[in-house]
Image (cartoon, rainbow, N blue to C red):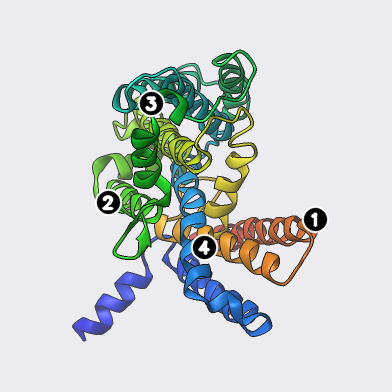
Amino acid sequence: MNKRYSIRRFLKIRGMGTALTAFAGLIIIFLAFGAINPTVFLPSNIMNLLRSMSKYLLIGIGQSYILITGNIDLSIGSVVGMGTMISATLMTRGMPVPLALLITLICCMAVGVLNGILVGKFKLPPFIATLGTMFCARGVAYMVNNNRNTDAIASGIGKEASDAFQGSLYYGQTLGIYNTFWIAIILFAIFFFVLSKTKTGRHIYAIGSNIEAAKLSGVNVQATITKAYLVSAFCSYVVGLITCAQASNGNMEAGISYEMYGVAAGVIGGVSPLGGTGILLGTLAGAAVWQVLENGLNMIGAQVGIQRVVIGVIVVLAVLLDVLLRSGASFRKKAADKR
């Protein structure tokens, strides 16, 4: 009896059903691509897949926090680019890696604070507020090195320090798995705990479900929204460093469209763009589905255009399903109230 109750309770967790559905779809997609091209199952491909998925997962975590509050963050990709360029530029000029990373972190988090103030305090529509910071952050990415991509970071900090930086964030492995994946999983576990087990997490869901009711319950809306945007900015910062380590230089165009990748990872995994619903376990599944689709379509020789169409259709269907489920729930609630 207790076991059945535990399973039932587990399945009733907000967004768990959609997350499990996404995981089931992930398995089906992976097996289908493997049946077409068995090299999909090669350990080397799986390891590369996990490493590539890590960036989508981190971006998805940040965007999911924002989506659950009922908002959106369009500045994510630009913060990735800004973080990549600032860190690379400072390192190519000989600044020690720890100090370069700290300065980059401060700059990225400043964007998160600004987004939180604009949306939480001044009540700007999140689309407009983060559209503005998106352009500003991308502008900084261009200006930081005078409208040029940087040289290799080894030219400033030396080959040994460059190799250590790249190895720790991208090329190195621990227990046979790339460090990039371990970083993503550790941050996933931390942010999963915050969202599901802390007061801040409960406040994030409350704002997304009904912001007026949250205010009446004593929730500090501005502080909570700012915290969500800080999570988004931090995840973008980490992805920016990973991108810098991958290329060993700074690219002004780094992070283009990543904000949409974050939306896709969250929505495919059941995070509602309407707010108040979804769990990070679903975001993990959504990021994996996205990467497996991209990897599998590449392995079978599909054109880039076809890849984008397939993923776009899946995102639209996921949102449509969310709208239909919410409409059905609302209808059932009204019917029950009439009785």
Query: Of the residues under marks 3 and 2, which one precedes in the sequence?
Result: 3
**Mark 2, residue position:** 193
Disc 3, disc 4: CB below 8 Å? no
Name the disc covering residue 160, or none. none
Identified by mark 2, the residue type is: Phe
Identified by mark 4, the residue type is: Leu
Residue at image location 61% in from the left, 27% down from the top: 252
Foreground label between 2 and 4: 4
Identified by mark 1, the residue type is: Gly
Query: Of the residues under marks 3 and 1, which one precedes in the sequence?
Result: 3
**Mark 3, residue position:** 157
Name the disc covering residue 305, or none. 1
Identified by mark 3, the residue type is: Ile
Residue 3 in the image: x percent, y percent?
A: 23, 83
Residue at image location 64% in from the left, 40% down from the top: 257
What distance separates the C-alpha of mark 1 from that of mark 2? 38 Å
